[in-house]
Image: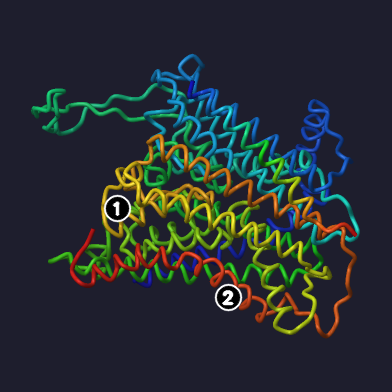
Amino acid sequence: MRDLLFLLGTIVFFVLGLAYLKGCELLRPEK
Amino acid sequence: MTPNGWFQILLFFGAVLLVTKPLGVFLYRVFDRKRTFLDFALRPIERLVYRVCGIDEQKEMRWTEYGAAMLLFSGVSLVLLYLIQRIQLWLPWNPQKMTNVAPDLAWNTAVSFTTNTNWQAYSGESTMSYFTQMAGLAYHNFASAAVGIALAVALIRGVARRESKTIGNFWVDATRAFLWALLPISLAGALLLVSQGAIQNLRPYTTANVIEPQVVDTRNSDGTVKKDTVTTQVIAQGPVASQEVIKMFGTNGGGFFGANSAHPFENPTPLANFLEMLLIFAIPSALTYTLGRMTGSARHGWAVWSAMAALFLCGVLVIYAFEARGNPLLPGIETRASSSQPGGNMEGKEVRFGVANSSLFTTVTTDASCGAVNNQHDSLTPLAGMVPLVNIMLGEVVFGGVGAGLYGILVFVILAVFLAGLMVGRTPEYLGKKIESFDVQMATLAILVTSLTILIFSAIASVSKFGTSSISNPGPHGLSQILYAYTSSVGNNGSAFGGLNANTLWYNSTLGIAMLLGRFFMIIPILAIAGNLARKKHVPESLGTFPVTGPLFTVLLISVVLIVGALTFFPALSLGPVLEHLMMNAGKVF
């Protein structure tokens, strides 16, 4: 059960990382 | 402090200075795809890797693609390491039949090695099989270091390129970092360590008869104490040298043994100790020269190097001074060095290395995000113990981790030129690029994420039973232990104060989260800066441009690092090591 939780947590973190990446990109003013 | 001690410290500093340019030029040639003397052997291997992995060497990536590739690579590597630990009992090269690692410890370790932190809530010789050590941990020592170097090079390209949408190819940069930067010196370095006495084998542990049997107290399950006579000792074996060299060269720091670089099989001689420290600083120092060469301003590279060198020398001076002075409350102890004894604070020190080499090692390992230790940081005198803490809090920018040190200091460089621009009332510029609001926002974000993670987790742990129950010394020293654990994790250093029992569900989980945030949530804004700088036009230097090549810039950079890095944590430090120092002077120790 804990295995599943940690693996799921890892996937969630890296998905959040990708979202964070997108968020930083969106902050950039387009010129 | 002794002349001999200072001679060894200055000899080390001179050696770092000597390797900076040659290795920096080599890295510049590798990442700019110019001919090197290793091409005849490595270029065919590189091409084979690309063919097998389906990588197009010529394809360039935008910063978002670069970041996504880095996240994907790290995420998959992390999961693989987790699984290796969870099934190690059924995998080969496990002569001691080490059981599968518990889920929370396996996750903490997987995160730790993926993020180049190498925080260890376990002792390697009693937890990890040889397969896990080699295929899991040592592999990650290479991989996380290669990722760091790739990211630093991507950021340098961002500064150097003009009106470009791309900053390189992550897979190509990481492969080159593996093959050219890390492998050759690791091979040669491992052989050198073996020549000094480091071991390299796959044998079961050796059982030896002790010379003099020892009588020890052991506790029965019902709590009663009985006397036992110990006649044998188990001596751990393993493939140590191959892991030791990349542990230092990749600024990883995760020891094969629990005692880390204080263990004679990892760090057998004073020469091995010197080489290991030099390996830690080699790439981070060289990358400053690479920065200068790739951006066409060698003087800027040296200005950044000078700022790092000044902060390093300050750190080693403070720690050596306090350790040589020792603990004034220990009665009857001669604290001055003489021909018959080393003097100073020898608690927690390996006697082979003494005060000077322990102080130097501590400074080097926490300036860089290495985290290997050859002495117990928990036993340092309070203000000496504050030095490694502050070194990590500054953001691991005093040479720093491989790659991580350079991209970390470039965040401070951007803030420094921004502040200089504010002072003179001009648009800030950095090597011909205008620094605009987005760049400063991203630099601020990188700094805020790390500071907030450290302080919030430390605050929760300090007032919760699940946090304070792991402390071995209550009072200000206990706060220092907690603060050090989170600082070390977020800074991806991995060294520990040593007194905190971190192998609990709370610490394994939250320190793991802290490591992930400290690594990836700092890297992404930095990649954003790289991408944004790359697409900008070049602005010719004018009279109003703040020069980033001279002593004025170096002093400004040091000031920004100290003000932004250190002052953020001053309240926490004053409740920990500073208070402990004042109480020691008032006659109370913890």
* Chain under numbered label 2: B
Give the side of residue B397 with respect to residue A23, left or right. left
Asked where in the image residue B104 lies, by quadrant, the reply is top left
- In the rendered image, which residue does mark 1 sit on? B348
- In the rendered image, which residue does mark 2 sit on? B559
Residue drawn at x 39%, y 20% is: B96
Asked where in the image residue B349 lies, by quadrant, the reply is bottom left
Q: Is residue B135 visible?
A: no
Q: Position of residue B233 (x, y in %)?
A: 25, 29
Q: Identify the mark nearer the N-term, 2 or 1.
A: 1
Asked where in the image residue B548 lies, by quadrant, the reply is bottom right
Q: Position of residue B251 (x, y in %)?
A: 55, 49
Mark 1 Cα within 10 Å, few/some/many (few <14, many 20+)?
Answer: some
Q: Is residue B14 visible?
A: yes
User: Which-is-in-front pick, marks 2 and 1?
Assistant: 2
Q: In the displayed structure, would residue B248 be above or below residue A2?
A: below
* Residue type at tag 1: Gly
* Residue type at tag 2: Ser
